[in-house]
Image: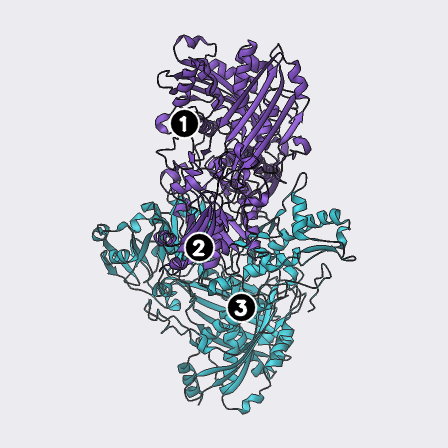
Chain colours: A cyan, B purple
Amino acid sequence: MNNINPDTNQEFSAIGKRIPKLDAAQKAMGRAEYIQDIKLPGMLYGKILYSKYAHANIVKIDISKAKVLAGVHAVLTGQDVPKRMKMGFYKDNPPIKKGKVCSFRDEVAAVAATTPEIAKKALDLIEIEYEELPAIFDPEKAMEKDAPLVHEYHKSNVLKLPWKLHYGDVEQAEKTSAFVVEERFTTQWVTHCCLGTSGAIALFDAKSNLTIHTNTQIPSLAQKDFLEALKAMGLENKRVRVIKPIIGGGFGSKLDTYAYEHIAILLAHATRKPVKILFDRVEEFKATSVRQPTVIYIKQGCDKNGKLTFRDMRMVLDNGAYTSWGATTPSVMMMPITSLYRVNNVRYHAKCVYTNNTYAQAMRGYGNPQATFAIESTLDMLAEKSGIDRIEIRRINKNQPGDETPQGFKISSCGLSECIDAVQNQIAMDKNDKRQKGIGTGIASLIHVGGGARIYKSDGCGAILKMDDYGKVDIFTGGTDMGQGLDNITAQIVAEELGLFVEDIKVVHSDTDVCPWDVGAHASRSTFVAGNAALGAAKKVKETLLEYGSKLLDVPVDDLVLKDRNIFAACDPEKTMPMDKLLRKAHFSPRGKMLMADFFYDPDNENMGKEFKGNMSVTYAFGAHGVKVHVDEETGKVKVLDYVAAHDVGRAINPLLLEGQVYGGVVMGLGYALTEEVILKEGETMNANFRDYKLFTAKDAVNIKAPVVETYDEYGPFGAKGIGEPGCVPTAPAIANAIYDAVGVRITELPITPEKVLAALKEKK
Amino acid sequence: MNNINPDTNQEFSAIGKRIPKLDAAQKAMGRAEYIQDIKLPGMLYGKILYSKYAHANIVKIDISKAKVLAGVHAVLTGQDVPKRMKMGFYKDNPPIKKGKVCSFRDEVAAVAATTPEIAKKALDLIEIEYEELPAIFDPEKAMEKDAPLVHEYHKSNVLKLPWKLHYGDVEQAEKTSAFVVEERFTTQWVTHCCLGTSGAIALFDAKSNLTIHTNTQIPSLAQKDFLEALKAMGLENKRVRVIKPIIGGGFGSKLDTYAYEHIAILLAHATRKPVKILFDRVEEFKATSVRQPTVIYIKQGCDKNGKLTFRDMRMVLDNGAYTSWGATTPSVMMMPITSLYRVNNVRYHAKCVYTNNTYAQAMRGYGNPQATFAIESTLDMLAEKSGIDRIEIRRINKNQPGDETPQGFKISSCGLSECIDAVQNQIAMDKNDKRQKGIGTGIASLIHVGGGARIYKSDGCGAILKMDDYGKVDIFTGGTDMGQGLDNITAQIVAEELGLFVEDIKVVHSDTDVCPWDVGAHASRSTFVAGNAALGAAKKVKETLLEYGSKLLDVPVDDLVLKDRNIFAACDPEKTMPMDKLLRKAHFSPRGKMLMADFFYDPDNENMGKEFKGNMSVTYAFGAHGVKVHVDEETGKVKVLDYVAAHDVGRAINPLLLEGQVYGGVVMGLGYALTEEVILKEGETMNANFRDYKLFTAKDAVNIKAPVVETYDEYGPFGAKGIGEPGCVPTAPAIANAIYDAVGVRITELPITPEKVLAALKEKK
């Protein structure tokens, strides 16, 4: 795509530039303040005591010894939690449990003390008598009639959720299909491994208004949760200020509020002091939420020309003992199921099932990686069965601009075809490599929301912008930078629109007192939605700048250009004025004005209605990943030799950060495909550390290419679409397909460990 | 005045209410964070070394021992200060001096170290060789031809300032006057005695942008000063963020930037760490600025009916060794000189003179107390001479609405007459008290700016307002709360306009990154200017609220009322909706909206042009103070028995805080009149502590009544005018007049100590 701003016919000056992350130097110098660094005057330290059983009645809790320990300010148990104080999507989760515990992760008591050490010691002094209950850990078994109930009041372990759709006629389509494949896939628990562990500091002012510093991706929705918590505590009509400090990563685990935040609030209220709860790495593994395991049954078919005829999928999701956003991931799984490639007849049904395991949460891709693993694995199977080349079958069925998918998604721009080209150009997919023993290549594609995702009543984001006398801008955005670089994106968009430099723009975010509302940093929506909000505010200010400029330079508004901190006439660049001077003229004149503007952008997407139809996102991102692997047939070990992740991003606002997103996503996907797994043994986490939880690290680095396909989406800010999540979506099937290509075994269970490959090779022989 | 909002015809709900200061509980609980409480990670402590002489050449500075002291990170001298880094109105003041020192207050070196103790020790290790120079301490003597020059390059000790006006024909008027009085008055140094001592913390980010936490009254203008400092340091095009923490009082001393702030910046830059400089009480006395002493020559006359014919004044002001805003106070002195009472022929000339004393600064009233002391003292003299009752002569000459004064001030509203009534009603002024020996009463009036004061290119203030889904408001204002209660005023105005409760409004102020521009907290302008800015933003949001309400309730906009967190139809209160619900409806609908608005209010006042003519303020505040004293003729001690301070405030937004302002002002005025004086002996402060500097404290409390006259000014927010400074303006003359009334001696030199009274009594006998 060319480098010309279609609005101004000028070359882009900030958009498309590889500008390093604005806070990179601060972080590198150790100056960035994480929750770990924040210390408030008089602050106490909170600690949480967890259950010793996966499922048990609490017979007795004795906190008397803990209470009298010197330095302890408060000890809370489930008795101290107001009845209506419940967390999560289903409101089935009180921050401290009473009566019974349903998982090892269940909070049973909490302490606030003057030091973390005293708090820890106090926990050890709490005596609890349990009566163990039969527990259930397998979601499919949990659906059986006589399975122990995780929550008796719920009558069944199956959550009452509406995840069911059927478009067209799958049964009829299956009958008329030339080729049909069918398979069962399973995926594992993985966790986010944010390098910054979770933490919160809660404090009340003299009027019982709450301020909470917390590692969240959703300042505005967290504010709502905490307001409800306050209400439950009898604190009506109070104010809640949520401040998110700089965080060490957010991949979905911070999309809900957690027990530790609510406990910090309860402790702060009980002690009238600031209370900080900070997770250590073990707690981070055990008590933050996982990507939910799925059992996937899939059937797809095509006609004799390779055109997809139907897709029929059924899933069982392990919800764990409580219900956070994990239970809603089927709503996003529907997207690849109904809309990755053209397929008219689709059926899907998912059951989320309570177990006594840790509970699941959103995680990058939000269900899409699980669904795409099954879809793209079976697509290769279908290609083989039908004798059609695996690239060809993807081309035959590819999405195209102007399509409306069975679910009602309107494809405004689509570069899937170009992405497949890019993969094919950079990874030889023609099976020539098979001459080398154990070498194989694989491909898998993806669709994801790229223009917001209306999962709440509003998908909006507000921005407020002000300019000072020196040509500097402050923009307060609802959007939350969590390391992904939204502050760069915002600054680049504003700088471009106002003809300034990126260093002229200060982005203020993640403080609900200062920043307007935003639904949160999820669904790859921030560049698109927060970007459009920032652009909207900048456009309003620009209009005023041009008006003043027109008067001062005696040039028609349409002839004026803002660039490099100047305003000038396009036709006569001699007619020019530095921007700061213009601003001072506007300010220091009768009825003077400082330039300010606000803008609220709520995308024109739709809540999915009945039958889950509706254009959830204003636009969609596409991509294709190609991978070349070597499979060691003696050890079963898979080595990734080469990786190409091509994405249609609309327009790359900042190619450097975009590549960073893709690299990070692919590495996360590689872990998901090959090594990562939270191992639960009867509900208990067995590998809560970085030695036993096998994260891809720097030493496992893989050669990743990230070609960018720019389709210029008409709705995106300067044509951009969101690209936060896709990097990890099709990695697992691309690798599974490559393994099959290399050694002829199809692995259907993630992660694809050497043991599984070896077992499959053995079985094949 | 009635309690009905003329805009809505509804009773006021927030305006006029005695709502305690919003942060009172936080302060009482010790939770408010002053500069003293702020500690940043890695922070160093700076200390300043001052001159040992009033006037001397610096022959040699040896910092070698200080530099190697363990814990010392930097030692700076005048050599390390960039050449163009100069402070003050005249830019004659580098933050660390080199070459020579011109006062005991001159900074000669500074240190940053890991603890304040180490920094102090390092100062002791700095060796300086001085060569003493002849010095000059009396401003009148400093004007003599052969006086030593404070600044050789300036050629003269008299500052080149244009303080000279002449309206009408004073000489002619004098000739035709029936009665003329003439007198010389002098006033002393007093200082602000803010209970929170001064301090600043400066830090640079990785990109050399500066953040400075500092006790300032002028965040926006301080930002400008610091940007210039950065430029002088070679840091072009950087960002400066000024954050003013909660401060313990501001009475004008914080209207300029100080050496300690610039030194903190230099030290932070040198060490790349946050550097805090905090004054102790001695430094606060010695190194913050004073109200400048004046020598005043005044002549006034009246015709046989008591009508003022002319006023002729001349002043010499001790500027001290450097030039801050103190040198500009004559511009405000002009206000009472030309416009307190009707007087057509006025002449005024002021000279500001360099001496080797401490330099002067703005202080509450900004010159007005000095001028009014002379005017109101001589008015009583004139009354006596002409045989007209002292109240009567004031009534004859009183200002009235619609007047335009010789200086071009347009009196939009004026309650001076009612203020005089109030004084007369509450203090018996008819000399009956004279029957009691040593008892006397006195009166003095005042005029002051009440609707901004255009002393800079802009007199504006910006406000940004946003509403959330719960009916809560955040307003970012340029206006700075410094204890005077601007946050209440802002919250009450916004609450009133939007039908909310004051606790629904959060006022964010004093952070240049977040808050729009404002010229500063001075000139009694904040209620008026920041109040109008807040009101403007609230009106914009209200308009949108009414639009939505009209649609949702099916009621014409004009019939809708916002009150008590509800919107309803005035004619049919059944048609109602809670405000939070309305806001959620606005947000959670297609093309949803969060309500935000910005407003920049720059009053329609005028810069004084040539000859100092122009309507400096949109409106003016008036007042009259009455006092009853007892003078002990044996000791000379004056005891204040009763005090009435009546002010025309337009409308009292919050009578409780308004009374607080008046009480505080009067107590400050009493100290000025009777006890306070910074004693300088050859330039050296001799009483830099609260034992020897005689501040009126709680034990000296006087019975003060503060009747409020409400004239409803058409330009003020809900009719209000500013009233921050007036409380201390006419106190000294009211007391001097009462002393004369009591014992027949006229004291013309402040403070009116027992010694001076005794001496006068002795002389009279």
Q: Can you give x and y, in whole percent of width and height, for residue B472 in the image?
A: 50, 42
Residue at horizontal 43 percent and vertical 23 percent from the top: B752
Number of numbered markers: 3
Amino acid found under the numbered disc labelled 2: Ile
Q: Secondary structure at mark 2?
A: strand
Q: Secondary structure at mark 3?
A: helix
Name the one closer to the observer, A637 or A167: A637
Q: Is residue B498 visible?
A: no
Residue at horizontal 34 percent and vertical 33 percent from the top: B691
- Which mark, residue B675? 1
Asked where in the image residue B305 lies, by quadrant, the reply is top right
Q: Is residue B241 left or right of residue A710?
A: left
Q: Residues within 10 Å of mark 2 (few under 14, many from 20)?
A: some
Mark 3, residue position: A661
Quadrant in the picture for the C terminus of chain B: top left
Quadrant in the picture for the N terminus of chain B: top right
Name the one closer to the observer, A181 or A234: A234
Q: Can you give x and y, in whole percent of width and height, for residue B46 in the image?
A: 41, 52
Name the one closer to the observer, B506 or A559: A559
Amino acid found under the numbered disc labelled 3: Gln
- Chain of the residue where label 3 is placed in the rendered structure: A
Q: Residues within 10 Å of mark 1 (few under 14, many from 20)?
A: some
Mark 2, residue position: B61
Residue lying furthest right: A571
Amino acid found under the numbered disc labelled 1: Thr
Residue at horizontal 53 percent and vertical 11 percent from the top: B384
Question: Who comes first in sequence, dot 2 or dot 1?
Answer: 2
Q: Residues within 10 Å of mark 3 (few under 14, many from 20)?
A: many
Give the CA distance from mark 2 to mark 1.
40 Å
